[in-house]
Image (cartoon, rainbow, N blue to C red):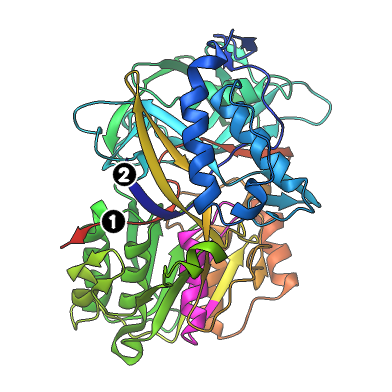
Amino acid sequence: MKRILRLGLSAVLVAVFAAAASCSKDGTEKKETPPPSSTDSDLNEWMFGYMKTHYLWNSAVKQVEPDYSLGYEEFLAKVLNDVAAQNDINHDDGHWEGGRRQYFYSRIGRYKTTASTASETRGTRETEEGTGIQYMGVFRIETGKEACMFELLAVSPGSPADAEGLKRGTIVTRVNGTVITDSNYEGLVKLLTPAESGETVRLTTASFNDEKVLVETPEEITVVSAPFDDNPVWMTKILTAGNGTDKIGYLCYNAFNSYYDEQLMEAFREFKSQGVKDLILDLRYNVGGHGISSLLMGTMIVGKAKQGQVFLKSSVNAERTVKGESDGLYKIGDKNVPEGTYTPIADGIGDLYALGLERVYVLSTNNTASASEVLINGLRGLDLEVRLIGLTTNGKNVGMESVTKDKDGYTYEFSPITLYAENGKGFKDYSEGFAPDVVIDESEYYVREWGSEEDPLLGTALKWIDTGSKPSVKELRAVRSAAAGQREVLKVVGRTGGLEGMILLRGLDK
C-alpha cells in the first residue's frame, strides 16, 4: 500500500449510486448490471479502516454503521452522506453552488495495473490517457431550437485530439453522427472524454460563414483515445507592454505536475532572461497537481526576498495531532520538504529563474482548484498582490493522502480528505473560493486560442498592466458586445480523472 498526500479536485457524487452506467454509441445512457457487491467487501473494509484513522472528520466516521455488501462506489458515497448527516460536519469535503453540494472531493478511482504503473498512483503518472479533450462549453445554437453544440475550451497539446487538428475554440455539432441536444449532451461528453485507450469517437465540426451562419464541415474527424505525454506547460509567450518597452510573461499552465518541473523552470528561465516585469498565469482549467511544483512556482515568482518564509502548512485531524503527527511546512526556496529533499526548489530561487515580483495576474474559472488555489493563498500569505480575472475559484481548501490497493488487474486509488491547507499567515477559510477582482465569464464569448490578446481575460490583464488601473465595467461591456455570440449558454463540462490533486510526494530524494 502506497500513500501519497494530495490536495486536489475530484468528484464523488452526493447521490448514492444504484448501478453502474455507461454510454451507447449515440450517447444515451444504458444500465449495466454491477458485479456482485460481495466482491467489493474487502475494498470497503480497506476504505473504512483508513477513514476511521485519517479522514479529517474521522470521529464522525466512527459513528457510521458500514454496509460492506455495497459496491465500492456506492459504499463510499453512503459513508460520506452518513457523515454529512451529522450536522454537516464535513462541509468542506465538496464543492458547493447555490447552497447545495455538487460533489464530494473524497473519491475512489481505479485503472488497469501495468508494469509501469503498478507502483504509482494515477495522479503521479507522466502520461495521460484519453483523447486529450479536457473541457468544453455546451451551447444551444439558436434559442428555441433543439440542436446544441460543444465549443472545445481545453485540448492537451500532443494528445490524439490535438494531432487531429482539434483545438481551443473548435465547434462540434455531432458526435458519432448524433446531433448534440440538451437531453443527450452528458452522454456525448463521456464519449469525448474516455478514460482508457483504444476508444474511438467521430466528430462533426462546424464554423461560421461570412453571413454568420454555422456550417458543418462535410468530413468527420476520428479521434482514437491513447496515452500521451501530459506536459502541463501549454504555452509561454513574451508580450510587450503598451509603453513599448516593458516585457510581460504569459504562462498557460494546466497542472502542477512535477514530472515536468524542468519545463516549468525553463519557462521561468525565459521570463528571467527577457527581463519580465509582470506575469500573467493562465490557470483557468488547472485543477491541481504536485505540491512541490506549487512551491517551486511560488519560489520562482517571489525570489530571494521571501526565502525561508512559509508558503504552505498542512494540518491533520485531532487524533493524529495528539499522536504526534506534526504540521507539514513548505518554505520558499527550501529544498527540505516534509517528504524529503527536492533540489529544484533551491535551484528555483537562484538568479536564473527567480523573478522577484511584487504582483501577479491569475486568469481563473471555477475549475481553478487545489494547488492553483494554494499558489494564490500562499503568495498572498507572503504579501504578494494576486490580481484575479475571471470567475471565483473552486474553493478547495482541503487535501488528500491517497492510498492504493491492487486487485484483479486493477489499481484502486482511494483519496479521502485528510488535511487542511493554509498559508504562512494561517489563513485557510477559502472554501467559497477566491473571488475575482474583475468578473469575466468566458462562456459568454466565442473563445480565442491561448495567448491571444483578443481573449477577454488576457486582454483585461494587459489593459490593467498598461493603465495601472483595474478596467471599468463599462470597458468590459464594450469588449463583451464585440466578442459575444448569439447563443444560449447551458453548461461548461469536462472530463474526470487524470492529474487531480496537489500531491505531496512521499520519499523524495532529488
Give the vertical position of 382 relative to 116 (above or below): below
Say whether marks 1 and 2 touch (CB < 8 Å): yes
Give the vertical position of 147 relative to 157 (above or below): above
Residue 363 inside the magenta-drawn segment: yes
Magenta extent: 361-386
Label 2 element class: loop
Left of 168 or right of it: where is 395?
right
Badge 1: residue crowd in 10 Å (few <14, some 14–19, many ≥20): some
Q: Position of residue 233 (x, y in %)?
A: 32, 54
**Which of the labelled discs sits on residue 98, or is there none?**
none
The three-letter code of the residue at mark 2 reads Lys
Left of 8 or right of it: where is 354?
left
Earlier sequence position, callout 1 versus callout 2: 2
Task: Tell me the quarter of the image containing the C terminus.
Answer: bottom left
**Which of the labelled discs sits on residue 506, or is there none?**
1
**Residue that badge 2 annotates:** 2
Label 1 element class: loop
